Image (cartoon, rainbow, N blue to C red):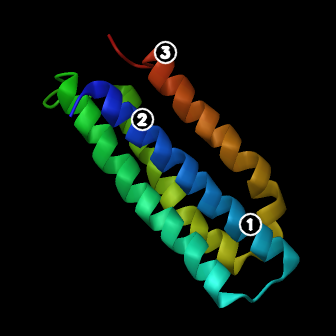
Amino acid sequence: MSLAFYKILHILGITLMFSGLGGLCVLSISGSDSQPAKKLAGMLHGIALVLILVTGFGALAKLGMGADIPLWVWLKLVIWIVFGGIIVVIRRVPQSASALLVLLPILGAVSAYLVIYHVGSG
């Protein structure tokens, strides 16, 4: 696959992840107990995380960064872990969902900043 294709799939994964997280936040804010809706949003989130990880490392391989991983990639992995675990916070602390609807996209912007400016690359 081409680098452009990896990037497109990576962005698709990001949009799916935010769709799933947004859905879970809205369900949590509304106090909904709709199990089918929660299941769908959770599945979107999980599938998206796998897609983001696989395509991110695929793109790195295309760029020839397999052996020497720069700081910005490590920071993005930390952010990916946060995005993966935040689903637990949304489910267990429903009062946090309103703030997370604002904070999670900001974290996504930080992730984009790391990629665009290659923070920590020498």
At 54% from the left and 54% from the top, the residue drawn is 16
Q: Which callout, 3 or 2, points at the residue further toward the start of the chain?
A: 2
Q: Which callout, 2 or 1, points at the residue further toward the start of the chain?
A: 2
Image spot of residue 46 (x, y percent): 45, 66
Query: Observer-nearest residue: 39 or 87?
Result: 39
In this picture, is 107 found above or below 47? above
Q: Amino acid at mark 1?
A: Cys
Image spot of residue 81 (x, y percent): 45, 55
Image spot of residue 58 (x, y percent): 24, 38
Query: Observer-nearest residue: 28 or 55?
Result: 55
Q: Which residue is mark 3?
A: 117
Q: Nearer the viewer, mark 1 or mark 3?
A: 1
In this picture, is 11 found above or below 118? below
- Spatial CA distance of label 1 from label 3 is 30 Å
Q: Amino acid at mark 3?
A: Tyr
The dot on residue 8 is: 2
Q: Which residue is mark 1?
A: 25
Q: Which callout, 1 or 3, points at the residue further toward the start of the chain?
A: 1
- Asked if the residues shown at circle 2 and circle 1 are in contact, with their CB atoms under 8 angstroms apart, the answer is no
Seen in the image, is 45 located left or right of residue 57?
Answer: right
* Label 2 crowd (10 A; few <14 / some 14-19 / many >=20): few
